[in-house]
Image: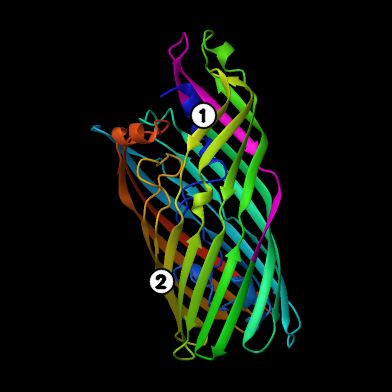
Amino acid sequence: MTFKSLLLVGGALLTGTAASAGGYQVTLAGIKNNGMGGVGVGLSLDQAAMFYNPGALAMVKERGVQLGANATLARQAFRAENGSVQRELQNNTTTPFSLFAGFGPAEGKFRAGIAIYTPFGNKLQYADGWEGRFALTQIDLKAIYVQPTFSYAISDKLSIGAGLTYLALGSVNLQRDVPAQNADGQFASIELDGDAERKFGFNAGVFFKPSEKLSVGISYRSKIDAQVKDGDVTFRNLSATATPGFQATKFAATLPLPATTSIGIGVMPTEKLTIGLDVNFVEWSAYENLTFDFNAPVNGSPTSVSKRYYEDALTFRIGGQYQITSGLTVRAGGAYDNSPVKDGYITPETPDSDRVTGTLGASYKFGEKFGVDLSTQFVNLKKRTQTQAELLSNGTTDRVAGTYKTSVVVPGIGLNYTF
């Protein structure tokens, strides 16, 4: 593994092991939706419709504000090819959050709103001395989106809506060791630290409710190319011999945040029971390569390219809620995500695999205006192995051969106020 190839694992920029969706996509918007397997495209539950289907917001009768937070508790194990020691990921916790506020006239045909959420965020720290230390040792990622939204009811049965998705804040810090020792026997290391440029995308949706027992929806979220143009590069513990070859201080890179098309159905057999089914199509094939441009040659070249070759992928979701009393509602659901990462292309910052998710949730209302929402997701990623032969065949030896196994628990809590 050359030093040049080690730099390529910066694919972790603005990405991370997602808690509830394939690749580096995260779907943790709306605590009620989280408890129902992440469904929402064909439903009009509350103000979180801004994220799932802006067209459904106009059909949300109540105006309101809701604040939610999740904790992602990840556990990950890795065993190197032909290795005897299983490495455990150091326990870590991240706290993605969301805020949705919907406004409009009580009897009017439109709703406007503002949403703030964290669609990308991750914190990973591998065990000291693990076999992939020269690919990745730790990453800390933060990203915040702001989305103004407008939705209009054309009739009692049909509504449309659209919003701007604005990458308002993004930061990443990535660290790894370098397979070169100095005079004191210390391995060198590299740290990449940068802020993403602010950029706009959009989402739009249509919601149709032909009867009190059925609703359908379709939504589209555009791709955003997240760009870091002036990130900092810092080397530590380089030997005097190696130092002249590693003079870069800045880097630039672009990562596609892919477009997503979703279709959803809502079924309400009774006034108390609601069932939702969603299918998400994510255009992951936009992520073909990751290119780094440095302001000075690194080990002889100012540019490096790493293969990703992601494939488009589908996610299937199902969930429901049942109102037990006027104040208490319970929820359950599940999802199956197809990984966009092909065999032999797994990277330590996104050790992705097909995943099965189970969810539970509940809400309790205090009077007419206040309520508390709870949710929990249990995400199990299938064990996944890539061999050195596969890496050699694909030309992807900038990553490590072995077996990954990951599971994540995602509890969440939300507060809501309607008016």
- Which residue is disc 2 drawn over? 333
Looking at the rendered image, the quarter that the C terminus falls into is bottom right
Magenta part of the protein: which range?
176-203
Nearer-the-camera pick, 338 or 40: 338
Query: What residue is shown at x 58% (from left), y 32% (from top)?
Result: 292
Please state if 285 lies on the left or on the right of 367 as rendered.
Answer: left
Our reading of the magenta stretch's main secondary structure is strand
* Residue topped by disc 1: 7
Which residue is more in the foreground, 358 or 8? Answer: 8
The answer to which quarter of the image holds residue 157 is bottom right
Q: Position of residue 76 (x, y in %)?
A: 37, 45
Residue 387 placed where, x, y %?
A: 29, 36
Whether residue 35 is visible to the viewer of this picture, yes or no, is no
* Residue drawn at the location 54% of the way across and 29% of the way down: 304
* Residue 403, percent from left and from top: 30, 41
Kind of residue at badge 1: Leu
| Vertical position of residue 24 compared to residue 181: above or below | below
Instruction: Label 2, secondary structure: give it.
Output: strand
Is 341 part of what is drawn in magenta?
no
The quarter of the rendered structure image containing the N terminus is: top left
x then y, percent, for residue 365: 56, 80
* Residue type at tag 2: Gly
Here the colouring is rainbow
